[in-house]
Image (spheres, rainbow, N blue to C red):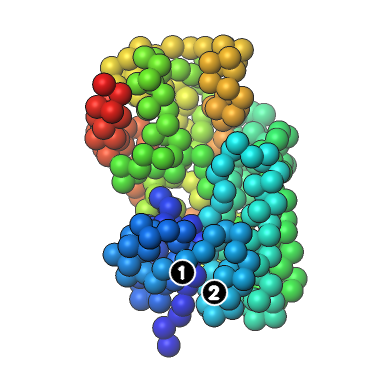
Amino acid sequence: MTQTVFITGATGFIGRVVSAKAVQQGYNVRGLSRREEGDQLLQSLGVTPVRGELTNAEVLSREAKNADIVLHLAFDHDFSKPFQDLVNTDIAAVNALATPLVGTNKRLVITSGTGFAQPDPQGGETFEDSPSANGPLVVRLQSEVNALSYAQKGVHVNVIRLPQYVYGRSNKTGFAAQLIKRAIDDGQSFYLNDGAHCFSEVYVDDAADLYLLVAQKAASGEIFNGTGKTTTSYRQLATAIGELVHVPTKSVSPEEALAQYGPFFTAFVSVANRASNRKAVEKLGWRPVGPHLLTEIKTGSYVGVAEEFKNKAK
């Protein structure tokens, strides 16, 4: 019998790839959609659109109840709101999805981030059980804790922690694209201090594969880092972007960055984030094989993205 998968965030950059891959694997896929354009996108992928918002608890609960697998990728990214409010919305959405699954042992996979782990003092990789970092964005861990509590209530729950750089397929909304656009607008590509600190990245198709692997194979209550390469430095990234859009690359101090780019952007590029994927590779057989971010910037899909941004800036 064909299994049904319900996906929140199905029309998003990652969600649409997950949706397409789930359809290809023979699942009956239903995806949350907020508007007509989203409906059309999902239908083109072979997905049944479900009209609703992340705040529509009744819709979320109904769809979760009728699904065999629930993949929760949606998150309110309106950062004009207090971040705690965004987290509270996510917790309420998870509760709406998980409550009808209590006692069924059906699978619920939620999304979190690798940036909530405290960086290794020696610059090494961090793991799923590494200590939590400090900072205002770490409150999103509340949603992880809430979701995992349902594992004690007969829900098969898992968490995927994605890195800050999920990229590929000419995406224009992710942080890599934002850095490219900012370099064009500012006439320079920047990094903080010496730019030696490294970040985690994952190609979008690899991330999508992980969602389905976790839904199919993971033991309940497990957390997985969904990362590919972890050895690219911010200086390398800034240099590649500068070369792509033909602007100089410049080191700036945290104070300069704060004044020019604001607290969120500055915080985002100031912290090392090297999250190991060993657990997903060893336990699930996950093999991230997509091109690295620098390759995508230098010779891949972001060449076209940069040209589009430059043409719009003229």
Q: Residue at x 58, y 14 (%)?
A: 259
Name the element at disc 1.
Answer: strand
CB under 8 Å between discs 2 and 1: yes
Tell me where residue 209 appears, x and y as whole percent: 41, 59
Amino acid type at circle 2 is Glu
Q: Is residue 25 left or right of residue 252?
A: left
Please identify the residue farthest to the front as the structure is shown. Answer: 36
Q: How would you rate the neighbour count of disc 2 (Cα within 10 Å): few for under 14, some for 14-19, many for 20 or more? A: many
Q: Residue at x 52, y 12 (%)?
A: 252
Name the element at disc 2.
Answer: helix
Q: CA distance from mark 2 to mark 1?
A: 8 Å
Residue under label 1: 50
Tell me where residue 288 appears, x and y as whole percent: 40, 51
Relative to 140, say whether 135 is above or below: above
Task: Find residue 223 and report its image quarter.
Answer: bottom right
Relative to 228, say whether 217 is above or below: below
Whether residue 20 appears in this view of the structure is no
Please identify the residue farthest to the bottom as the structure is shown. Answer: 1
Task: Find residue 99 and report its image quarter.
Answer: bottom right
Residue under label 2: 63
Camera-side residue: 244 or 96? 96
